[in-house]
Image: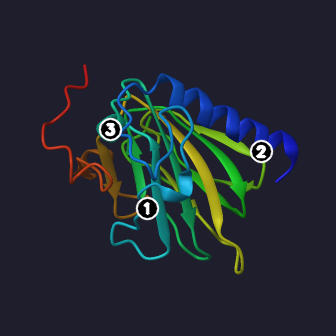
Amino acid sequence: MDCASRLLALLLLFRFSIFCEAFYHSPNEGSLVVRNISKMPESNFGREGFSHITIAGAVLHGMKEVELWLQTFTPGSRTPIHRHSCEEVFVVLKGRGTLMLASSSHKYPGTPQEYPIYANSTFAIPVNDPHQIWNNDEHEDLQMLVVISRPPVKVFIYNDWSMPHTAARLKFPFYWDQEVLHEPKDEL
């Protein structure tokens, strides 16, 4: 990763940690402003080839408007086809893969457009557009910083790209929120 990318990642982490008033604090985690990511809770939530760390979160840290994650996908792993009612921005830190993106303006997603993603690239997902991210590199992990708006969000999961939007399965709370979030969020 070049110096500009590292600086951008550190700036994002610093900005989010300053605005997070309810961070938990322990001697292993560092101060409220600067925390050690390698000491933060990490899990795959039963999903092979996946790792998730909530760096700044709504449920865990009291964030109200945004959430920041560090996600890593091993070679060949991918997200489910899904959509959600929030904006999502990705910064690819290392690796390469494919973003598959379809529109929510039809009755079903249809054939998605494919976009190559790679280290030092960034992309945004429009609200409610079905998408999927694949690590199609045979040797290297795909690692990304992910920023979402309006956390925690309701996620709708598709079996395939021809499934009607109305048939997508609701998953709420999502994996990283389910142990601590028990009340449905009003999404007005």
At a point 78% along the width and 38% down the height, the residue shown is 7
Pointer 1 or 2: first along the chain: 2
Badge 3: few (under 14), some or many (20 or more) residues near its Cα, within 10 Å?
A: many
The disc labelled 1 sits on which kind of residue? Answer: Glu
The disc labelled 2 sits on which kind of residue? Answer: Arg
- Residue 28, percent from left and from top: 45, 53
Left or right: where does residue 59 sit relative to residue 89?
left
Element type at mark 1: loop
Mark 1 lies on residue: 42
- Residue 99, percent from left and from top: 62, 54
At a point 72% along the width and 63% down the height, the residue shown is 96
In the image, is residue 29 above or below residue 14? Answer: below
Q: Which mark is residue 153?
A: 3
Kindly report which numbered mark, 3 or 1, lies closer to the viewer in this rendering: 1
Badge 1: few (under 14), some or many (20 or more) residues near its Cα, within 10 Å?
A: some
Left or right: where does residue 90 sit relative to residue 172?
right
In the image, is residue 75 above or below residue 110? Answer: below
- The residue closer to the viewer here, 166 or 5, is 5
- The residue closer to the viewer here, 163 or 132, is 132
At a point 34% along the width and 64% down the height, the residue shown is 159
Farthest bottom residue in view? 138
Quarter of the image where one finds residue 63: top left
Image quadrant where one finds the N terminus: bottom right
**Contact check, label 3 and label 1, Cβ < 8 Å:** no
**Contact check, label 3 and label 2, Cβ < 8 Å:** no
In the image, is residue 125 above or below residue 137? Answer: above
Mark 2 lies on residue: 6
Q: CA distance from mark 3 to mark 1?
A: 20 Å
